[in-house]
């Protein structure tokens, strides 16, 4: 799953998005292809809007049941390290390609901006999924500009009151603006449970089971009643 996630999310998906941007430029479609503006302005607008697009997509992946079934594969990981940033279901990556592709077409984002954004997004995603423990003061300053490991780790809590926060990957501002920001877990990061409460067995993290998981619904084991003898 890690190898597939790496290949699709960090190589094929960005290449596909660059192709979409080149196609939109060739036919002259999209706002930035119609309005003349400096390259640096186009880069800034594209990065801001694409990152907001990723944030909105991530929010929807958690709120819409059908989308969550695919994104849940990412959250089934009971560890939190750089490999978590590469663990995505192929179905989610297809959804991401469609969603981001439509935004790129509508915006007319230039291909060079897509390349810069995807490199920045992938690099910071690997960073903020790492198990680094930054000094508290350093973390407080950094999370004003980018999403830090401590900030994103809260999002991977098995407790929904913590996990349904901090959706950002690159820019940390959207969570604050939307009221989805949570500075820290209820307990310490070392005591916080990572993953999903219902998907913690070793077999849940096997390759084929992860591919099949969007079609499954975990049903908790309920205690059986003892039948009374008459």
Image (tube, helix red, strand yellow):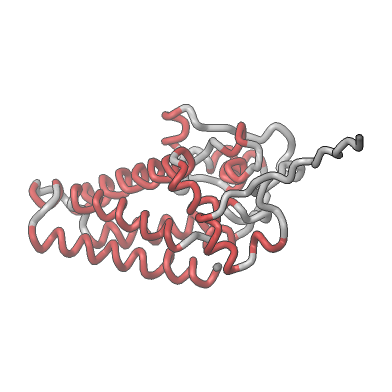
Spot occupied by residue 142 in the image (x, y as percentages of width and height): 53, 43
Residue nearer the viewer, 67 or 54: 67
Where is residue 7, by image quadrant? bottom left
Depicted 87 relative to depicted 102: above or below? below
Residue drawn at the location 29% of the way across and 58% of the way down = 114
Residue 149: % across, % down: 59, 48
Closest to the observer: 209 or 37?
209
Above or below residue 102? Residue 55 is above
Q: Is residue 191 left or right of residue 167?
A: right
Residue 29 visible in the shown view:
yes
Name the side, left or right, on which 131 lies relative to 10: right
Q: Can I make out residue 127 in this image?
A: no
Q: Residue at x 34, y 45 (%)?
A: 53
Instruction: Give the residue at x 74% y 35%.
Output: 187
Left or right: 114, with 35 as reference point: right
The percent coordinates of residue 43 (x first, y second) are 26, 51
Question: Quarter of the image holding residue 222?
Answer: top right
From what the image shows, is residue 149 above or below residue 173? below
Q: Nearer the viewer, residue 74 or 187?
A: 74
Q: Quadrant of the N terminus?
A: bottom right
Q: Could you tell me residue 214's position as x and y percent? A: 51, 55
Can you say which quadrant of the picture contains the C terminus?
top right
Seen from this angle, which residue lies furthest right? Answer: 230
The single residue placed furthest to the front in the displayed view is: 230
């Amino acid at each position: 799953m890690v190898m597939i996630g790496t290949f699709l999310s960090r190589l094929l998906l960005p290449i596909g998005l660059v192709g979409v941007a080149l196609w939109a430029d060739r036919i002259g479609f999209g706002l930035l292809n119609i309005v003349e503006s400096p390259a640096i302005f186009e880069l800034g607008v594209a990065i801001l809007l694409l990152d907001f697009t990723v944030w909105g997509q991530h929010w929807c992946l958690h709120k819409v049941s059908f989308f969550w079934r695919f994104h849940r594969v990412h959250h089934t990981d009971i560890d939190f390290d750089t490999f978590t940033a590469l663990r995505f279901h192929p179905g989610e990556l297809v959804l991401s390609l469609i969603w981001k592709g439509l935004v790129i077409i509508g915006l007319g984002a230039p291909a060079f901006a897509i390349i810069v954004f995807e490199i920045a997004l992938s690099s910071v995603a690997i960073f903020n999924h790492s198990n680094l423990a930054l000094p508290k003061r350093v973390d407080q300053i950094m999370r004003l500009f980018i999403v830090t490991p401590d900030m994103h780790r809260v999002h991977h809590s098995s407790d929904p009151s913590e996990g349904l926060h901090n959706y950002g990957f690159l820019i940390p501002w959207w969570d604050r603006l939307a009221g989805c920001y949570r500075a820290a877990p209820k307990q310490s990061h070392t005591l916080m449970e990572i993953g999903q409460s219902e998907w913690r067995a070793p077999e849940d993290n096997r390759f084929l089971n992860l591919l099949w998981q969007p079609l499954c619904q975990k049903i908790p084991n309920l205690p059986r009643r003892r039948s009374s003898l008459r």
